[in-house]
């Protein structure tokens, strides 16, 4: 059982955002890129990871995922911008 739980946001080629949860972010992004991930991301590639957050419990990660999904587009963009300023190499 993984002790790392990730919430992530992908930017799709149509300039929309997809928010998801995983325990293996690299593997999950590959699944999305291969068209086997969420129905929403199929056909919307290329995808780029624009935000990720690691949490210690699945419950916390799923709660955070719901919070991010409830944000407006402007709020998501502010969250992404803040994260990218702290993580410029991501």
Image (cartoon, rainbow, N blue to C red):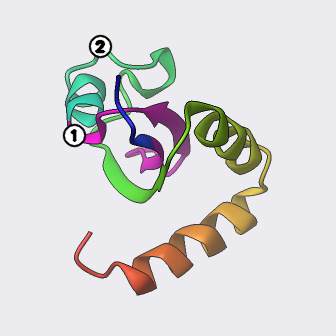
Answer above or below: position of 78 versus 35: below
- The residue drawn where x is 65% and y is 61% is 76
Percent coordinates x, y for residue 18 in the rendering: 53, 39
Query: Mark 2 Cα within 10 Å, few/some/many (few <14, many 20+)?
Result: few
Quadrant the C terminus occupies = bottom left
Q: Position of residue 9 (x, y in %)?
A: 48, 49
Residue 60 position within the rendered picture, expressed as x and y whole percent measured from the top left:
65, 42
Relative to 23, does residue 7 appear above or below in the rendering?
A: below
Q: Which residues are magenta?
A: 6-26
Residue occupying the point 44% across, 43% down? 6
Image-based side of 15 in relation to 73, left or right = left
Residue 65 occupies quadrant: top right
Q: Position of residue 16 (x, y in %)?
A: 54, 46
Q: Nearer the viewer, mark 1 or mark 2?
A: 1
Label drawn at residue 16: none
Q: Quadrant of residue 79?
A: bottom right
Q: Which residue is mark 2?
A: 36
Q: Is residue 9 above or below residue 57?
A: below
Q: Is residue 48 left or right of residue 33?
A: right
Is residue 24 one of those drawn in magenta?
Answer: yes
Q: Count every numbered label the image shows and give the total.
A: 2
Secondary structure at badge 1 equals: helix
Front-most of 25 and 11? 25
- Which image quadrant is residue 38 in? top left
How far apart, in angstroms, are the residues tagged by discs 1 and 2?
A: 14 Å
Foreground pick, 54 / 70: 54
Mark 1 vs mark 2: which is more N-terminal? 1
Q: Which residue is mark 1?
A: 26
Looking at the image, which is closer to me, 78 or 53? 53
């Amino acid at each position: 059982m993984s002790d790392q739980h990730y919430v992530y946001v992908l930017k799709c080629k149509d300039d929309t955002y997809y928010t998801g949860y995983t325990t293996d972010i690299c593997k999950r992004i590959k699944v999305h890129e291969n068209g086997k991930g969420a129905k929403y991301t199929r056909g919307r590639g290329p995808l780029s990871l624009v935000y990720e957050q690691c949490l210690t419990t699945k419950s916390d990660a799923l709660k955070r995922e719901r919070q991010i999904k409830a944000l407006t587009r402007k709020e998501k963009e502010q969250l992404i911008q803040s994260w990218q300023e702290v993580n410029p190499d991501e």
